[in-house]
Image: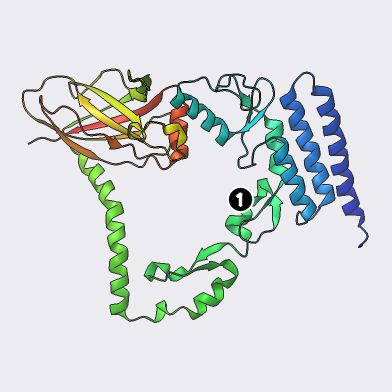
Amino acid sequence: MTPKSGQEWGTVLSHLVLGVVSLHAAVCTAQASRGAAAGFLLQALAATATILAPGLGTDEDGLAGAWVATVISLPLLAFDFHWCTNGHLMCAGCFIHLLADARLKEEQATCPNCRCEISKSLCCRNLAVEKAVSELPSECGFCLRQFPRSLLERHQKEECQDRVTQCKYKRIGCPWHGPFHELTAHEAACAHPTKTGNELMEILDELDQGRRKEMQLYNSIFSLLSFEKIGYTEVQFRPYRTDDFITRLYYETPRFTVLNQTWVLKARVNDSERNPNLSCKRTLSFQLILKSKVNAPLECSFLLLKGPYDDVKINPVIYHFVFTNESNETEYVPLPITDSVECNKLLAAKNINLRLFLFQIQK
């Protein structure tokens, strides 16, 4: 066993003091606040793990991280942690998922441990736990070494020699993906720089086709912005239940006026699937309804974007429809949110706030 230097002993001593202080704080606050006590306890465990495995690369370190994950009954997938009024911890992803499930089942969301009520107003973040978790070791998915969670993202993006990267000649069609430490050797031997002009033109044509599809959306939006009649408004989807024996969740906005016409928006989850709470994949679709009478067909383009105070990720998609007195409802079309996590964010909210743009096409 290699003897420790004075600097290493100083580091060990500082972590030891931190662990003792955190453990003492956990004992002192246990009666007043279980959540705060849990945070101090995790901080003490993190300090102890650092002493046992200073290089963050030993088996003991991984076991310490796994043991702490077992203590709070959740995998450590996120830095944000919420706690209920009885001090039980939930990571941000699980917290949002619980709120979304309660919305779908028309129930009050409850803590999975003690069954007390939880909501965004009743629960708050536990900064002590978040700080402790950020110092716990986590395994890099590429090199399998362990690092503090707070440093893992930077390591995987910038420092890891085994991270997956692409050839610099990908712009002329090289499909190579491989570990970063093999990049230099590959680029030195890559055959794409030596291809003839005709070969490169075929590759560039394929790349241009993909780029044209991306630019088509933005060109369409710029074209719509030149229309004479443009309107937009903030819309608020409110949750309701159907009158069926087995009720289903749907959303509807109050009536609003845009382009001198009265409209309503409706939305549904997983296309009115019977039990969307049993599905991991969740989607929202919406329908635009014209409520006022028109003297002539009203041709419109429309799209929904996130509201000014929301952080949901929506990829804009433009829809078209010709409204008449006989055909005043569009089909249900997908709300282009990026994934189920973003859908859960919307479902967990009390109301869904978005922004609607309407463009009237003049004949």
Q: Quadrant of residue 301?
A: top left
User: If the image is split into quadrants, where does the C terminus sit?
Assistant: top left
Q: Position of residue 321 (x, y in %)?
A: 17, 35
Q: Residue at x 40, y 77 (%)?
A: 192
Disc 1 secondary structure class: helix
Amino acid type at circle 1 is Glu
Pointer 1: residues within 10 angstroms few (<14), some, or many (20+)?
A: few
Q: Position of residue 8 (x, y in %)?
A: 87, 53
Q: Residue at x 31, y 78 (%)?
A: 199
Q: Nearer the viewer, residue 153 or 344?
A: 344
Q: Residue at x 61, y 50 (%)?
A: 153
Q: Quadrant of residue 42?
A: top right
User: Number of callouts in the render?
Assistant: 1
Q: Left or right? Give the position of 275 relative to 86.
A: left
- Relative to 142, say whether 339 is above or below: above
User: If the image is split into quadrants, where does the N terminus sit?
Assistant: bottom right
Q: Is residue 254 visible?
A: yes
Q: Nearer the viewer, residue 354 or 67?
A: 67
Please name the residue that numbered disc 1 is placed on.
153
Q: Quadrant of residue 361?
A: top left
